[in-house]
Image (cartoon, grey):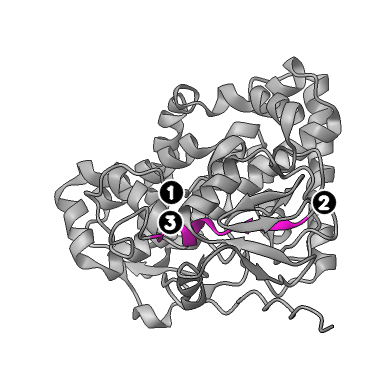
Amino acid sequence: MSSPPEPPRFPTDVPSGLQEQPEFRQLRTEQGLCPYRLPHGAPAYLAVRYQDVRSLLTDRRFGRAHSVGPEEPRLLPIVQRANLLMVSDGPEHERLRRLLAAAFTVRGVERLRPRVTATVSDLLDGLEKHGGPADLMELFALPLPILMICELLGIPVGDRTRFRELAETFLAAKLHQMTAEQIGAAGQELRQYLVELVAARRREPTGDLLGTLTAEGDLSDQELVGLSVTILIAGHEVLADQLANTVYFLLTNPGHHRELLDRPELVPAAIEELLRWTPQGTSTGSPRRAVEDVELGGTLVRAGEYVLPLLSVANHDEAAFPAADRVDFHRPATSHLGFGAGVHRCLGSALARLELQVALAELLRRLPGLRLAVPAEEIAWCGGGLVRGPYTLPVVW
């Protein structure tokens, strides 16, 4: 009796720019889930259609807490740890999320608007002082989210540059040439720094998020460190790339750029549409492991098998978004999957929206003549990892 065929390998060759990978477009036309083998861990099914992805993310029979360890399908060599916000389920996940919820509600985030606005203004002051050509990634897109996360956690100003370097290396987002040893060393140094910061908060309570969690919660030092790393990583590189990708899209699509210059009130709608349309990474989403046999998208997933949701691919599903490949700032409000869905929906979505809206609105207002400093085809792109965006974004105005 012949053995079943080996699953195809996950495609890691990413097109330049913001084009969808053709393999994924084809997968949406096939029936059922698609078995694939990722660079690390066990084989997994890919969920690529909108309804399949949404069902996966909202079905408690698929768990994140069970999807940890060396067998977890993943693109990067980093092995997920259990007991963090993103890899916990049930009462444990609800407890951790409840402790963080107040800081990330729309009302809670709105209190940060003056600080976000001031940070954006300061960064644009620096950009203008630098003069063109300038790298918008280095001087604007990357610093903004890390500064806001540091503000939220209470990272001392003098430590923030090193903190950013460690976070970028640990995530290995644009440093795909890093070895597993280098990534691990950065993660260890990052955690050791946070251990010392938690100890300082226990000695002298502060009003920042880390200080509040330390004083009011029942979290262990290990949980406080784990949550801090989760917040930092989740709120840094992905948001920076979304901001850079949004600007790149506008600068290479002058009609849409002009529309926002003429009608700045469309910025919130534009942010939502580009969260839907922009490919966020080769693998946007974390694998789920079935805790029992479950039928999903016409495929029987056995207990113990993994399903990887491709959120960006599902956001281009014509069944959910008519003319899905077309960017339309007047598209009726849709439940895009840019922030996920279900109990693991991105806790920081309100803060991300605020940062993106303020950053784009101010960029358009202050630099209406912004344009690329090099031909679009000369921009080098990061791909094959968890995020997707330009290494640099040289601009003039």
Amino acid on which the number 3 mark rests in the picture: Asn
Q: Are marks 1 and 2 in contact (CB under 8 Å)?
A: no
Residue ID at (25%, 49%):
331
Residue 72 image point, x, y percent: 78, 58
Amino acid on which the number 1 mark rests in the picture: Leu
The answer to whether residue 341 is above or below residue 176 is: above
Residue ID at (65%, 23%):
98
The residue indicated by pointer 1 is: 123
The residue indicated by pointer 3 is: 315
The residue indicated by pointer 2 is: 189
Left or right: residue 323 compared with residue 58: left
Residue 210 colored in magenta in the image: no
Q: Nearer the viewer, residue 238 or 365?
A: 238
- Which element carries disc 2, helix, strand or loop? helix
Of the residues under marks 1 and 2, which one precedes in the sequence? 1
Q: Which residues are magenta?
A: 305-317
Check the image and name the residue furthest to the front. 1
Residue ID at (77%, 32%):
224
